[in-house]
Amino acid sequence: MTRLPFPLAPDPEAEALERGRKLFAGRCEFLKGVVAMSGLPPADRVEICFAGRSNVGKSTLINALTGQKALARASNTPGRTQEINYFALGEAHYLVDLPGYGFAKAPVATVEKWQRLLKAYLSGRPTLRRAFVLIDARHGIKAVDQEILTLLDKAAVPFQAVLTKADKVKAAEREKVLDQVRARLQPHPAAFPEMIVTSSEKGDGIATLRSTIAALADV
Ligand code: GTP
Ligand code: MG
């Protein structure tokens, strides 16, 4: 197997940066919370989603990208997001905030229900252009993440690893975690070969992620 280096995404060129800025400076509104596949909105535009373990920072990242502090509900309690939340970004994009996987402070039956929905969504949404899989920069890829990455491989959904909470780790520790993530991404054919390191708190990587999303409309 060819070993991919999985470098960090380079800083975007000025034009790409501007496209990302413009896209996210536009309107972004909550559309609906979906609890069953039958409730998904029509698959009529570019859709990107944020997946990851409970509490990794999915909802907070959507707020940082859109510059709206309370657009997606974030909280310190794992299991805050329990529905598939759709946000309309401009006329041509959906941003999708997913319930987390792994440990959640919610009743087992409830968690099982949303895990089933999450998996059905990730493997059955034709307009899903890319899944951003969020990984805590302190912890790296865990077994529960591997399960989701394998599911994305099988469904042929391209995914990109995004490290979160970069402000919580020192540079040396971050490098170790990045190496672990690189190694774990290797076996996954659906992995996009660049990673993005972010901090929703400090703003690191947010402009890069905005332009990455803006560029997806062209693909
Ligand atoms: P679920 O909806 O439960 O799956 O969680 P989530 O992945 O949406 O996480 P959420 O955005 O609710 O964030 C969880 C906690 O992490 C919150 O207390 C956030 O303030 C915190 N957090 C998220 N991103 C960052 C970050 O970049 N830096 C720091 N320091 N804290 C963050
Ligand atoms: Mg959430």
Image: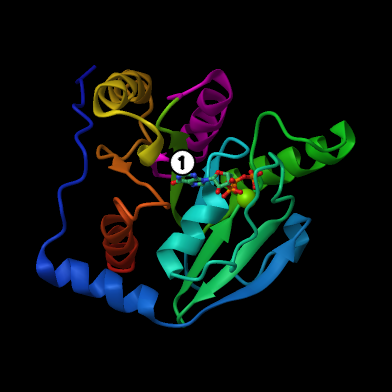
- State left or right for residue 217 relative to residue 132: left
State which region is magenta.
139-165
| Colouring convention used in this rendered image of the protein | rainbow
- State left or right for residue 45 relative to residue 190: right
Taking the image as drawn, is residue 125 in sight?
A: yes
Indicate the quadrant containing the N terminus: top left, top right, bottom left or bottom right: top left
Question: Does the magenta run of residues contain 44?
Answer: no
* Residue 39 percent across, percent down from the top left: 75, 65
| Disc 1 residue type (three-letter) | Val
Taking the image as drawn, is residue 219 in sight?
A: no
Question: Does the magenta run of residues contain 157?
Answer: yes
Q: Residue at x 31, y 21 (%)?
A: 173
Against 150, residue 82 (above or below) is below
* Residue 184 percent across, percent down from the top left: 38, 20
Indicate the quadrant containing the C terminus: top left, top right, bottom left or bottom right: bottom left
Comparing 144 with 173, the one in front is 173
* Residue 85 percent across, percent down from the top left: 65, 61
* Residue 48 percent across, percent down from the top left: 47, 58
Tell me if mark 1 has few (under 14), some (14-19) or many (20+) residues whose alpha carbon lies within 10 angstroms of its own.
many
Q: Residue at x 56, y 59 (%)?
A: 96
Q: Residue at x 78, y 35 (%)?
A: 105
Q: Residue at x 72, y 64 (%)?
A: 33
Residue bearing mark 1 = 133
